[in-house]
Amino acid sequence: MLYLSVLVLLPIAAVLARSTSGGASTFWREVTSPEARAAIELTLAVSALVTVVNAFFGTLVAWTLVRDEFPGKRVVNALIDLPFALPTVVAGVVLLALYGKGGPTGIDVSFTRASIALALLFVTLPFVVRSVQPVLLELDRSMEEAAGSLGARGWTVFRRIVLPNLAPAIVSGAALSFARAVGEFGSVVLISGNLPFKTEVGSVYVFNQIENDSLPAAAAVSVLLLIAALLVLGAFTLFSRRMSRHVQ
Amino acid sequence: MSSSGVLSVGPAQASPASRRGDGYAESRRVEQRARAGRLGVRVLALGYLAVLLLLPVLMVFYRTFEHGLGPVWSAITRPNAVHAFWLSIELVAIAVPLNTVFGIGAALLLERGRFRGRGLLGMLIDVPFAISPVVVGLALVLVYGNNGWLGGPLQEAGFQVIFSVPGMVLATAFVSLPFVARETIPVLRELGAEAEQAAATLGASAWQTFWRVTLPAIRWGVVYGVVLTTARALGEFGAVSIVSGRLEGQTQTLPLYVQDRFENFDTTGAYSAAVVLALLALGTLVAMNLLTRRTRAAQSQMTRDRSSRTTPERSSDAERQPVAPGEATP
């Protein structure tokens, strides 16, 4: 318990204390300064986009891994966890090697907002896949077979039978990927170029403020991003719990 | 369902035999469409993975080794690179054992203990997953920095935390804290407390029970957690970046070295170090997969043992339901 409080509790308390030490007005001024606002808005917008894309492709990949058969499936399944195992800086370097300047594709995403989305998609890929996969494995196929024998086509079966059952898992996976995307730093820092007002995300803004020794600004933006992540996480968790109760 | 089939034949000549043939053709059409759909989904899913995951990683390996092994070897044996590598190992060697002991303890408390604030503890353990590494760095600076809550007194005592190894250990331990506990808790839950209670009844001390009964049963869960902790600790960038001060050859870990080389346009150096880290990550993946299989084998072994004790003739049924109803209430 001492370990936990020295390591986790005390530092977090310090951030909270520092962000509010100047009173609410200081807090507000720090998070609404033009650069901070631009960074926060960019972070939330890109994270939302990434979350939606993840929900779609994550479900698709999970479906392929559970219901489809093809050679090399086990290798693909193992590869899904690569973004969790790979250090985030390496993720940035890896993406730049292919999609950066002088890459073989001719595409150069470096220093654009698209690059931020790309990096975030890379690091958050496993969340939805890994939360949908076990549910899909457990799903009783007799319902789908019944629907099929009653004349429902593949897509209808998926939309009316499978999707409602998967929805709670998709939502909770998406919530985790949103929380991760909001705080992501390592993979974004190399690829985005960190141009203020253009490609500077919240975590990079916090980093720069720490380097410039303006700790109140760093603390205020940190707390705001943390609250955003926790709110989405909490709301999605509630939503997913309600949905799963509804389905049952 | 077979409206098109009926139309194409026409109602007048529809003998029972030909109708059956139409139904067959119709079901084949449906099957073909389903197969095409499945193929489309497969191509889309695998294409996404290739573009986002596989091709970039392969590209880095190609770029690193395109001029042979020589430049790579000289890049990773440079003093700063070697120092960064060993510093990373040092951090892992300190942070991982700390988190392993804490993780097992916390898992036991959460799963076996009954005390107030248990829910709170469970939430607190997950906090490092929800917090940005940059915020972790900031938090540690605020507490242990020169003007921090504890930093001042510690410095007077001659103990520098921020911009040196202790701060980096704290940052590494913070971000990799939850893994062991999170992987051990489900195993403990699955295991149940009966064996431990039996040991206690037979006169074993708490410590003996832990070493002889609990630990052997949860060891694969713990090892899995340790693997995840190690991977995370080795790759941590944001938090360590802030608390280390990034002094070349002094407080620069391997991920920080990658960034430093990249920003100095030394792509060979950056790619070589990145490949070292990527290989360690791939090793982690292999270990994770082996362990998952091992855990699953151990679990089915456990259920087989139980089922052979209770209902030997229906072991396959018992396997599907890990806890046989008769055993839940002894």
Image (cartoon, helix red, strand yellow):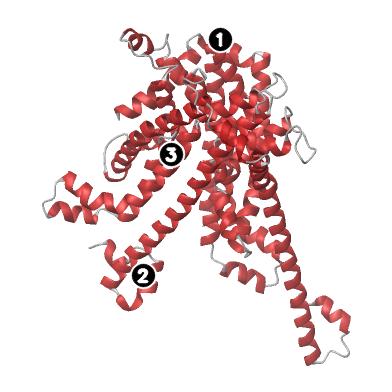
Q: Secondary structure at mark 1?
A: helix
To which chain does the residue with label 3 belong?
B
Picture disc at residue B230: 3
- Tell whether B161 sits left or right of A122: left
Q: Is residue B47 left or right of residue B146?
A: right
User: Are the residues at dot 2 and dot 3 in contact (C-beta closer than 8 Å)?
Assistant: no
User: Is residue B247 in sight in this rendering?
Assistant: yes
| Quadrant housing the C terminus of chain B | bottom left
Q: Are marks 2 and 1 on the same chain?
A: no
Front residue (pair A40, B36): B36
Q: Residues within 10 Å of mark 2 (few under 14, many from 20)?
A: many
Q: Give how far apart the Cα atoms at labels 3 and 1 are.
A: 40 Å
User: Is residue A42 placed above or below B151 in the rendered structure?
Assistant: below
Q: Which residue is mark 1?
A: A26
Give how far apart the Cα atoms at labels 2 and 1 are.
Answer: 63 Å
Front residue (pair B55, A10): B55
Three-letter code, disc 3: Thr
Q: Position of residue B103 (x, y in %)?
A: 34, 39
How dense is the environment of label 3, judged by Cα within 10 Å: few (below 14), some, or many (20 and up)?
many
Viewer-proximal residue among B171 and A57 = B171
Give the residue number, with chain letter if any, for mark 2: B318
Q: In the image, is residue B145 above or below residue A55?
A: above
Question: Which numbered disc, 2 or 3, marks the residue closer to the eye?
Answer: 3
Give coordinates of residue A109: x percent, y percent: 75, 33
Query: What label does residue A164 carry, if any?
Result: none
Foreground: disc 2 or disc 1? 2
Q: Nearer the viewer, mark 3 or mark 1?
A: 3
Q: Could you confirm whether marks 3 and 1 are on the same chain?
A: no
Residue found 64% across the figure and 69% down from its top: A147
Mark 2–mark 3 distance (CA, rounded to whole Å) = 36 Å
